[in-house]
Amino acid sequence: MSTFPLAVTRPRRRSMRHTLDTRVSPYAYVAPFFLLFGAFGLFPLFYTAWVSLHEWTLLDEEQTFIGLKNYETLLADGYFWNATFNTLSIGVLSTVPQLVLSIWLAHLLNRRLRFQTLFRISLLLPNVTSVVAVVVIFSQLFGRDFGLINWMLSLVGVGQIDWAAGTATSHIALSVMIMWRWTGYNALIFLAAMQAVPRELYEAATLDGASGATQLRRITIPMIRPTIIFVVIVSTIGAMQVIAEPMLFGTSSGGGGGLVSGGPDRQFQTLALYVYEQAFTVFDFGYASAASWVMFLIVVLVAGVNFLLSRRVKGGLL
């Protein structure tokens, strides 16, 4: 009996298994992520859109379909636009200086220094610190009566500032907290990108007499431009969703106004706080869902504008 057909079948089976392995296995590897993303990302997103079209409260068992009425009411709500302004203001004040400091710190740590590992690890300490501890400590630093910041300002003739009471001052205080937490984290991302820049470029620039600042502007920033765009977009999204710092700042600093109102005059209530207030204080989930979707669209719009601006920035400019 001939074994030739069997010998031909085995390589063919191996070829089919190899084809299935190379074509199907990548999808099998990434499938768990997309399943989880669909369950905890896409489904809540679309379900929130459905809820936003209803009068949906915990005080009523019936959910009445009202179409776009929640959106109409929201766009005419002064508190919503106040929260939008506060979010954009805090985002700009915290993100722009944060990115500049992150690149500068990464540039310094990219040089040959003693105890490099210690310095790099220390950059992560603010990020791993509890946000509650950060807000409590900085609220005391920005305290009106016994705060260290006001004491230092009094040395140069500046009077006491009630940081939590004013719009501009509260935004500055919150921006400092956010910068302190995330500057080191972003610096490590930039540092990782700088490590991939060929050292020959710096050596040639040094021989040509270029200073460290010139090398940063002419070599480093153009070479890590994709990383800068990534960090700008991620930082923008994070700044648009800030909630813990303003939620705790009012009570920790004695500014009053409760946890979710952002001060007595809502001077530092962000969009995330506004959504939280409507959902878990007023219990109007339909209105809160509409606010969430508008917030989502604003985040996408701001992130898209940042992406386009970052793409247009010349390599030698930040």
Image: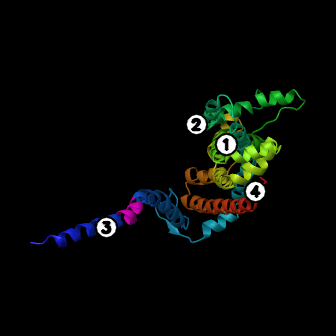
Query: Which-is-in-front pick, marks 1 and 4?
Result: 4
Given residues 307 and 61, the one toward you in this image is 307
Disc 2 on helix, strand or loop?
A: helix
Which residue position is annotated with label 3?
15
Residue 170 picture location, percent across and down: 75, 42
Q: Earlier in the sequence, mark 1 or mark 4?
A: 1
Given residues 247 and 37, the one toward you in this image is 37
The kind of residue on which mark 1 rests is Ala
Given residues 295 and 232, the one toward you in this image is 232
Badge 2 crowding class, 10 Å Cα cut-off, few under 14, some 14 to 19, many 20 or more, is: few
Gap between marks 4 and 2 measured at Cα: 32 Å
Which residue position is annotated with label 4?
315
The kind of residue on which mark 3 rests is Ser
Q: Is residue 188 above or below residue 289?
A: above
Q: Is residue 99 above or below residue 9?
A: above
Q: Which residues are magenta?
A: 21-28
Q: Earlier in the sequence, mark 1 or mark 3?
A: 3
Q: Could you tell me what secondary structure mostly forms the magenta stretch? A: helix
Q: Residue reaching furthest left?
A: 1
Badge 3 crowding class, 10 Å Cα cut-off, few under 14, some 14 to 19, many 20 or more, is: few
Disc 4 on helix, strand or loop?
A: loop
Gap between marks 1 and 2 measured at Cα: 15 Å
**Side (left or right) of 205 relative to 297:** right
Give the label on residue 187, or none. Answer: 1
Gap between marks 1 and 4 measured at Cα: 19 Å
**Side (left or right) of 28 relative to 7:** right
Give the label on residue 128, or none. Answer: 2
Q: Is residue 23 above or below residue 162?
A: below
